[in-house]
Image (cartoon, rainbow, N blue to C red):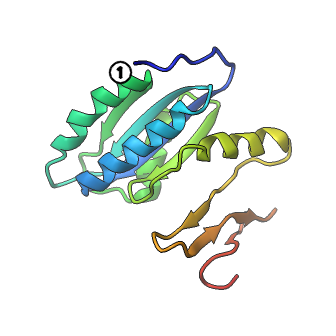
Amino acid sequence: GKLNKTDNEISLSAILTFRNNAEFTSLALTASVLALSYTSYTSEVIMVDDSSNERMAIIQRVKPRLSHTFDIEIRSLRTHAGPLGYGSAMNLGLTRARGNYILLLNNDIIISKNTFKMLLATLKSHARVGGVVPRFVEADGKVQEAGSAIFTDGIAMQLGSALGL
């Protein structure tokens, strides 16, 4: 059945960009919707198809089931002028986002159920923090990245990455 969400002044927009890889995208969408359902926030998922050239029918089958089961709106956009690339596709999704908080996702990650809840708790408890990044763990358990720092000049640096930084 549907999960009952409490009314909350905070809303989340999760933007999931992808190009091809229907099965990965379907898994990433399912994991993201499940993780969003563990928060008490009203959420939406904006899927940006960056000119996929393979059949994405599995997503069209999964999308309405997830939306109905978890009471989360899932909207789709598609670029038609050829692939834009990750940044431009994400920017397209951002133009449609309605949430106070924005989650930037890619189709090659699987979100654990409490990830969004923990990220938002961190963000809300530190007024000077404008963004949070989760720890990325490879399938074998090796840490790929454990956050980032953005300096006052706008330069960003990965922390705890496999590069030894």
Q: Nearer the viewer, residue 9 or 84?
A: 9
Answer whether residue 89 is visible to the viewer in this image.
Answer: yes
Instruction: Name the quarter where the C terminus is drawn.
Output: bottom right
- Horizontally, residue 62 falls left or right of residue 35, namely left
The residue under label 1 is 68
- Horizontally, residue 8 falls left or right of residue 68, namely right
Please identify the quarter of the rendering in which residue 117 is found.
top right
Answer whether residue 82 is visible to the viewer in this image.
Answer: no
In the image, residue 16 sits, relative to residue 107, either above or below, namely above
Residue at coordinates 68% horizontally, 46% vertically from top-left? 119
Q: Residue furthest front?
A: 1
Q: Nearer the viewer, residue 106 or 85?
A: 106
The amino acid type found where label 1 is placed reads: His
| Spot occupied by residue 147 in the image (x, y as percentages of width and height) | 68, 64
| Spot occupied by residue 160 in the image (x, y as percentages of width and height) | 69, 74
Residue at coordinates 55% horizontally, 76% vertically from top-left? 142
Residue at coordinates 42% horizontally, 58% vertically from top-left? 86
Residue at coordinates 50% horizontally, 50% vertically from top-left? 111
